[in-house]
Image: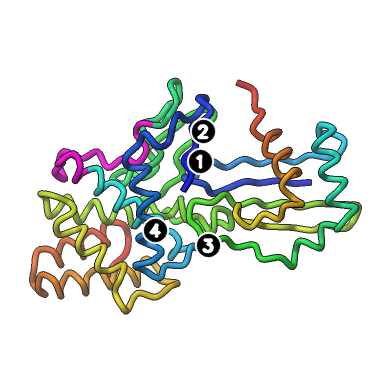
């Protein structure tokens, strides 16, 4: 899957990550499995995604399974609760850059 | 409103910066006194207005003239070791930081360098460098206190009835000229300053 965080207070807060399920830590892999199994990534495409505030993070996720790909975009204040554990795991991994 | 404490690696406590606090509080002003949609060019105008009001808060608090001001947002919050001077420079967009971890400040200061992107709500924190620089050019040309004439023109333009929610930079620029002529007269130095400033960032009026 592909993960990208942009926005926030300034343009330099951008982080990006390409990762497969087996590369995630157990909590992240479990969070992804829950999203895929129930309700499924496509469920989130119908939800409101645009926040009303300024300086929010904007999250982009593309989840690929075989030939199928679902792309999601949510402002921080609109992130569905079911996606929060996955986004937190991906964000944490993306921020773990070598010093 | 939430201000983070920073991890200490890139940032320290955000609330210790008056320009950052001024920027965030000003977003409330921009949201309720103006129509600007937070996407694309109107979103960059929204961001720019919060930057302008944020630095004016600091300049007013410190009693700084245009010549004394450094036009930086977030001067106080970069962690030790980060190569940079602030989050943004209104006077010199693109020069605020250039760091191994943080990357390079991507803000343009001229329309020829406008960034087309789908991220960051269409680059609202990127292309805001263009109207930011236009404001500093107006203020520098007029001299004195930036919050007097330049700030008055910008704030009145934000609330002007002709400003569209999806305003482009060019549409906003035309309103600033109209407002300047209404406030100070058609042949005023304020109108000339506004026209020259926008021309300086590649927006002809």
Gap between marks 2 and 3 measured at Cα: 27 Å
Residue B193 horizontal/vertical position (percent)? 16, 61
Judging by the rendered image, the residue that carries numbered circle 3 is A52
Of callouts 4 and 2, the N-terminal one = 4
Q: Which residue is mark 1?
A: A12
Which residue bears the numbered disc 4? B28
Q: Residue at x 74, y 43 (%)?
A: A85
Question: Residue B64 colored magenta?
Answer: yes
CA gap, disc 4 and disc 2: 28 Å
Chain letter of the residue beneath label 4 in the structure image: B
Q: Are marks 2 and 1 in contact (CB under 8 Å)?
A: yes
Q: Which residue is mark 2?
A: B102
Image mark count: 4
Query: SS class of the residue under badge 4?
Result: helix
Q: CA distance from mark 1 to mark 4?
A: 23 Å
Residue in the image at 64% along x and 62% along y: A49
Extent of the magenta region? B59-76
Q: Is residue B94 left or right of residue A86?
A: left
């Amino acid at each position: 899957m592909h993960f990208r965080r942009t926005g926030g207070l300034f343009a330099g807060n951008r982080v990006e990550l390409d990762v497969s399920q087996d590369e995630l830590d157990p909590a992240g892999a479990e969070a992804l499995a829950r999203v895929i199994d129930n309700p499924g990534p496509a469920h989130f495409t119908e939800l409101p995604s645009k926040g009303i505030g300024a300086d929010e993070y904007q999250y982009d996720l593309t989840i690929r399974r075989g030939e199928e790909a679902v792309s999601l975009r949510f402002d921080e204040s609109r992130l569905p609760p079911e996606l929060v554990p996955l986004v937190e795991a991906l964000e944490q991994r993306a921020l773990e850059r070598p010093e | 409103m939430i201000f983070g404490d920073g991890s200490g690696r890139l940032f320290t406590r955000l609330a210790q910066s008056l320009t950052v606090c001024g920027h965030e509080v000003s977003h409330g002003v921009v949201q309720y006194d103006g129509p600007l949609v937070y996407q694309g060019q109107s979103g960059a105008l929204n961001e720019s207005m919060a930057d302008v009001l944020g630095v004016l808060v600091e300049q007013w608090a410190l009693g700084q003239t245009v010549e004394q001001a450094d036009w930086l947002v977030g001067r106080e919050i970069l962690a030790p070791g980060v190569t940079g001077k602030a989050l943004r420079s209104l006077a010199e967009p693109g020069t605020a930081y250039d760091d191994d971890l943080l990357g390079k400040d991507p803000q343009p200061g001229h329309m020829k360098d406008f960034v087309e992107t789908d991220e960051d709500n269409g680059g609202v924190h990127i292309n805001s460098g263009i109207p930011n620089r236009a404001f500093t050019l107006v203020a520098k040309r007029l001299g004195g206190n930036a919050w007097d004439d330049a700030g008055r023109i910008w704030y009145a333009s934000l609330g002007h009835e002709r400003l569209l929610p999806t305003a482009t930079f060019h549409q906003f620029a035309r309103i600033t000229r109209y407002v300047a002529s209404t406030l100070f007269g058609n042949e005023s130095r304020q109108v000339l300053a506004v026209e020259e400033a926008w021309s300086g960032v590649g927006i002809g009026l």
